Amino acid sequence: MHTAVTDLLGIDAPLVGFNRSPGVVAEVSRAGGLGVLAASAYSPAELDAQLTWIEQQVEGRPYGVDLLVPVTTAALRGSGDRATLAAGLRAQIPDEHVRFVEELLIRYDIPAGTPHEPDGELIANLDPSGVPALLDVVFAHPIALVANALGPPPPTLVERARAADVVVASLCGTPEHARRQLAAGVDLLIAQGTEAGGHTGTIATMVLTPEVVELAGDVPVLAAGGIATGRQMAAALALGAAGVWCGSVWLSSHEDISPVSVKRKFLAATSSDTVRSKVRTGKPSRQLRSAWHDEWEKEGSPAPLPLPLQPMLISDAWARIDEAADAGHEGALALESFFIGQVVGGFAELRPAGEIARTIIDGCATRLAELADLK
Ligand SMILES: Cc1cc2nc3c(=O)[nH]c(=O)nc-3n(C[C@H](O)[C@H](O)[C@H](O)COP(=O)(O)O)c2cc1C
């Protein structure tokens, strides 16, 4: 199956698989698509180890990396070292919010859990001084694609990618985002509709994809959001996309590293069971609806804080909920949730990631052949 994207990336089928689990990334690339590692959760040393492992698995096949190159916010400017940065941000969290989360955990009887370092990963992601080390690791590996998670890629990322002959991709949720990404010099646009898991806008993939294709000119477009089957992939190609970028579907794979309790809830969910909400990160993101959302939406509950204060407020609570839910704790299971798109309604069982990728690719080819037969 040849499109502008298979040529650009040197892959057999225009399917990109986004996930934070190296096992998923390797299997998607081995199946003929492109696996992309969500790298925002890893330190430079961890990322180096993950990328080395992926390379051993893919045996020369292309793969990519998705980064969260930090935004500089007013809160971060002139903040000094990471401990000072964390303390300064923590001081901005109102007592009302801290009490609300504490009382919620007490009401659901959530145990204390294993102590962990608060804010570590989060602050590392927000600290602009960590970027050069991260980019040094990324560009020391033979990646085929680099994507930036939030906003247009910064000039330093684009320059380093150009020098290393690496494709720069970027997600957009509106035509305006797409124009900004094109101005920043991206080689590949990802039009991500509201159906998607994770941070997402309000425009449906069906509407957004042709809008972005129209303004992208020669820059190829991947459709994202609501794509987990061959039929959906064929529909994306029919809309003018040169391929698809899938995220949620891999959470139904064996290789995905999400807590087992979350994956079980996904298998039982329908396509109506997601919610686009600020209660997890402070920015609207699609996730599985749970008692956590019901509690935040009740009258008298505080409004979610902006990023990064909301994740700082709740990160310890989520570590405790995930740990207790995995141990079968009833209250934790009621609260348990994670980022997921509307395609969750189609999850029937956990399967190997490579099998999922091949099923989507083969299903797309079948559907395209059926469409070609239409008179
Ligand atoms: C669990 C999860 C985490 C995500 N995290 C990120 C992220 O860190 N960076 C990013 O660029 N996109 C992220 N996304 C969005 C995906 O890149 C992708 O655009 C989206 O999943 C596509 O829609 P789908 O979920 O319907 O497949 C995430 C998606 C999911 C499901």
Image (cartoon, grey):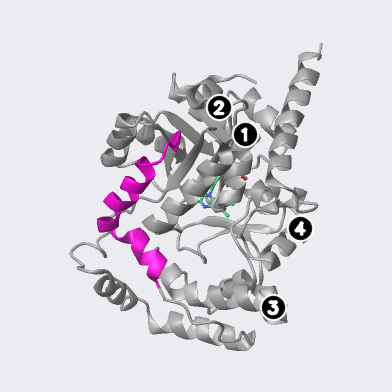
Q: Secondary structure at mark 4?
A: helix
Q: Earlier in the sequence, mark 1 or mark 4?
A: 1
Q: Earlier in the sequence, mark 1 or mark 3?
A: 1
Label total for image: 4
Discs 1/4, front: 4
- Percent position (x, y) of residue 88? 27, 74
- Percent position (x, y) of residue 274? 66, 57
Q: Which residue is mark 1?
A: 206
Discs 4/3, front: 3
Quadrant in the picture for residue 222: top right
Q: Which residue is mark 2?
A: 210
Q: In the image, what residue type sits under mark 1?
A: Met
Quadrant housing the C terminus: top right
The answer to whether one can see residue 299 in this image is yes
Identify the disc placed on residue 131.
none
Q: Which span is picked out in magenta?
A: 119-145
**Mark 1 and mark 4: Cα distance apart in space:** 25 Å
The answer to whether one can see residue 314 in this image is no
**Mark 4 and mark 3: Cα distance apart in space:** 18 Å
Q: Earlier in the sequence, mark 3 or mark 2?
A: 2
**Mark 1 and mark 3: Cα distance apart in space:** 40 Å
- Depth check: 30 or 375 in front? 30
Residue with the most extreme top position: 375
Q: Circle 4: is it few (<14), some (14-19), or many (20+) Cα within 10 Å?
A: some
